[in-house]
Image (cartoon, grey):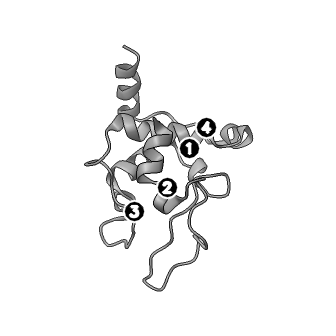
Amino acid sequence: MGRIVYNQHCASCHGANLEGQPNWRKRRLDGRLPAPPHDRTGHTWEHPDDAIFRVTKQGFQAFAGPQYETDMPGFGNVLSDDQIWAVIAYMKSRWPQELLERRRPKKPSAAHEAHVSVGSR
């Protein structure tokens, strides 16, 4: 499911192969940053799952504030929590084992714990 949801809602900006947009670290003329990659060449893997979830659900402004100019919308009105977690699982399935091992261990958020509890019933 994660691959399907990613292809429908994320690939147009973040790339079909999670490669992101060209020059993703350099601001465009409008002052906004291009979409970063979600593969090993980006930095998504450095963030805890609950942060990735929150950015996906609420948009990047949930972290940076309402004044921050971004093209990253929140998908909370479009995708269910299960669909967002599935996209995160899909992205992680594409990361090399070495990156998965280097990820900082973080305590899962209450939202993720609730998701896991509901999903395991």
Residue 91 disc label: 1
Tell me how far mark 1 sits from mark 3, CA to CA.
17 Å
Image coordinates of residue 15 in percent, x first then y, are 55, 58
Badge 2: how crowded within 10 Å, few (<14), some, or many (20+)?
A: some
**In this rendering, would 19 be left or right of 75?**
right
Tell me how far mark 4 sits from mark 1, CA to CA.
5 Å
Name the residue type under label 1.
Met
The quadrant of the rendering that contains the C terminus is: top left
**In this rendering, would 19 be left or right of 66?**
right
Name the front one of labels 4 and 2: 2
Residue 93 disc label: 4
Is residue 49 visible to us here? no
Nearer the N terminus, badge 1 or badge 3? 3
Dot 4 and dot 1 residues touching (CB under 8 Å): yes
Tag 2 residue: 11
Nearer the N terminus, badge 2 or badge 3? 2
Tag 3 residue: 72
Nearer the N terminus, badge 4 or badge 3? 3
Tell me how far mark 4 sits from mark 3, CA to CA.
22 Å
Q: Which residue lies furthest to the top in this view?
A: 121
Name the front one of labels 2 and 1: 2
